[in-house]
């Protein structure tokens, strides 16, 4: 959903994320150890109550889509986090986020800066979320040519990407 969020929401959220990633918010938990190849990357938990305007904007604009895509009008929020990648970070290997059985769970990623393919924009292997967890794990843990087709998703700031945590990316 390109440029889904208004500039004011993006700017407020970006300022908060920069503060959290710099360690300026004691309420946020450092989750960087959970990242594959954590060099030059930061992952911090962000309390849902800290920036409710972003969640409200996403909810209002995507409710009908999420109801249809997830097959349920009840959406579960498992976590909210800030993920910052610094210049020069090496590319991550293909991976899944979690092995999730509940189809009502999706990953929503809010882009706070413009991204282009050359800087390492988000990449996904379409359809891999339909495989069994074991099959997907074996595919990305021990890749063998040919690799499945992949799509690079370069988006403007304020965009929201929605994908299954079981998709290889």
Image (spheres, grey):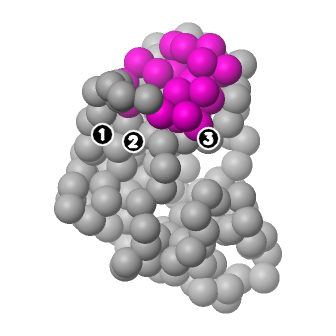
Choose top left, top right, bottom left or bottom right for residue 51.
Answer: bottom right
Q: Horizontal and vertical percent for residue 117?
A: 21, 55
Q: Of the residues tagged 2 and 1, which is closer to the observer?
A: 2
- Residue highlighted by disc 2: 161
- Foreground: 8 or 31? 31
**Does the residue at mark 2 contact the one at mark 1 (Cβ under 8 Å)?**
yes
Q: Quadrant of the C terminus?
A: top left
- Foreground: 75 or 163? 163
Query: Where 79 falls versus 87 (above or below)?
Result: above
Q: Could you say which disc has been placed on residue 162 in the image?
A: none
Q: Horizontal and vertical percent for residue 22?
A: 60, 86
CA separation in Å, label 1 and label 3: 21 Å
> Which residue lies at the image location 71% right of the left edge and 19% below the top edge?
101
Q: How many marks?
A: 3
- Residue highlighted by disc 1: 1
- Residue highlighted by disc 3: 97
- Foreground: 70 or 134? 134
């Amino acid at each position: 959903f390109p440029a889904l969020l208004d500039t004011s929401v993006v700017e407020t959220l970006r300022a908060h994320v920069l503060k959290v990633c710099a360690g300026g918010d004691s309420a946020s938990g450092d989750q960087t150890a959970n990242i594959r190849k954590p060099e030059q990357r930061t992952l911090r938990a962000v309390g849902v109550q800290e920036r409710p305007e972003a969640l409200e904007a996403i909810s209002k604009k995507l409710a009908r889509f999420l109801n249809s895509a997830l097959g349920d009008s009840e959406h579960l929020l498992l976590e909210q986090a800030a993920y910052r990648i610094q210049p020069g970070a090496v590319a991550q290997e293909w991976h899944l986020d979690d092995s999730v059985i509940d189809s009502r769970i999706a990953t929503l990623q809010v882009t706070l800066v413009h991204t282009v393919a050359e800087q390492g924009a988000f990449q996904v292997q379409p359809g891999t979320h339909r495989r069994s967890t074991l099959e997907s794990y074996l595919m990305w843990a021990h890749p063998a040519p040919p690799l499945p087709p992949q799509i690079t998703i370069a988006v403007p700031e304020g965009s929201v990407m929605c994908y299954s945590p079981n998709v290889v990316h």
